[in-house]
Amino acid sequence: MITIDNLALHYGSQKLFDRVDIQFSPGNCYGIIGANGAGKSTFLKVISGEIESTSGDVRIQPDVRMSVLKQDQERFNDYPVLETVLMGNAPLYACGQEKDAIYEKEDFSDEDGLRAAELEETFAELGGWEAESEIAQMLVGLGIPIELHDKQMSELTGRQKVKVLLAQALFGRPDIILLDEPTNNLDIDSVVWLEEFLLDYPGTVLVVSHDRYFLNTVCTHIVDIDFGKIKLYVGNYDFWYESSQLIQRLMKEQNRKAEDKIKTLQEFIQRFSANKSKSRQATSRKKLIEKLTIDELPASSRRYPWVGFKPEREVGKDILAVTKVTKSVDGVKLLDNVSFLLGKGDKVAFIGDNELAITTMFQILAEETDPDSGELKWGVTTSRAYFPRDHSAYFEDDINLVDWMRQFSEDKRESFVRQFLGRMLFSGDDVYKQVRVLSGGEKVRCMLSKMMLSGSNVLMLDQPTNHLDMESIAALNNGLESFDGNILFATHDHQLIQTVANRIIEFLPDGTIRDRRMTYDEYVADRRKDAASA
């Protein structure tokens, strides 16, 4: 158990949070959420001891082992993969190192023999003889093949290093696991494996993530950093989000009778606990939710942008035909005879580990580059809006945000542009900021605004959720769900794919594609069946 008493963290006059009193118990997974800059990662660092708090205490029993997901990918470059993972269990690793050093001595003494016998006993008690097999199973589950297990970390790709560091954090069943954005750079199968691992994990997990589906699957509680406070709520992310939205609406309706508010909230709790239970922790979570009082539901200061796409004209019958498109970049064939038709109502998610192939496909569709062979034909009724993965070129001019947005708006009036920017959370003097200095998330919101102003009936989006906070991702999700035209998009956000896409095109390593008309959850289920039968 982790006990936090009266915790506060200040940086000069800036207060991240104060008067925090929380207990984290074994058997639960706590999702830590908050706006960008609220202090989510910092809170984990305070718990791990990496950062000292301004005041208050974090108490953890001395015999409890805590593991933290490391963020420095280059830190272990001089070590083999298996040894890097073994380091995750520090007592076992230290025991093995000392034991091996004794056996390597040329002048092996009686005293050394006694010490070696003690270490052998400790090594066995810590599961040392099973460690290599356990590590191998874990690495394979995360997509690191056997042939890489004896390689140096320096020989691995960045994505592979992330997986090894995740295995390091999970190895040896620590009592407490702290995970900061663990699904970043993970492929579908690895995320599914991690979800299964955490669902079966008996210890305490604290996880920061922007992946709403992941939080819904594994979390029993939500830790919300808001108003400079940190509060704990029962339930997964969907329950937190829906209840916080309901609270906000009720707070605005000041004339509603208290009894009506209570009735509305109680009906909401009952409906959610009956219909929203997804994971193996569903039974216990349902019981906890049913016992909630009104005061235990969240009120949030979060601000959500408004994202909505309205096509100026309806798309016709012929939308897009891609025929035998082949493309190589720097001598590597990324696309090999790719063909598909886009029909009316199709909302297609591009997925696959080869993200360069996906980006290249988008660039061809946007007519920014030509295929080496093959052709594509857009229907005459189509109008396209494109969100490129790398959109930095759009923000190189020395102009402010109002003038930047005017370039893409038929209505040039400043009042109109400012009103539009306000819905995208740019207000006050922010609208006069130079576009060069905007943050990554602000630039994404600008690009989405540009697309909304276009009135296009076909949207193409390559990783639009990069740099966005959860509030903006939710707004984008809602906007794409309600869009009447066609969508081609790529994202790592499971919930966005599941709720928007009705068709999945998977880009395979050999440059070909696999085209499936199904939801993302159906696709993932098929992948799991294939893996189980392999």
Image (cartoon, grey):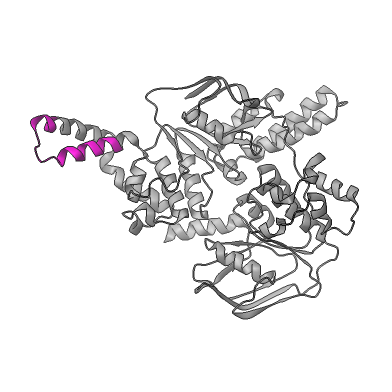
The percent position of residue 171, horizontal first and vertical second, equals 38, 41
Say which of 253 and 518 sits in front: 253
Q: Please, which residue is most extreme toward the bottom here?
A: 373
Query: Do we see residue 475 in this rendering?
Result: yes
Toward the viewer: 300 or 200? 300
Q: Is residue 518 above or below residue 212?
A: below
Report the span colored magenta.
93-114
The question of residue 103 being in magenta is answered with yes
Circle count: 0
Q: Quadrant of residue 129?
A: top left
Going by the image, does 259 lie left or right of 3?
right
> In the displayed structure, does residue 128 sit left or right of residue 290?
left
Magenta portion: prevailing SS class: helix
Q: Position of residue 378 (x, y in %)?
A: 74, 74
On screen, 176 above or below 199? above
Whether the magenta-drawn stretch holds residue 183 is answered as no
Residue at 59% over, 57% down: 522
The residue sitting at 25% across, 38% down in the picture is 96
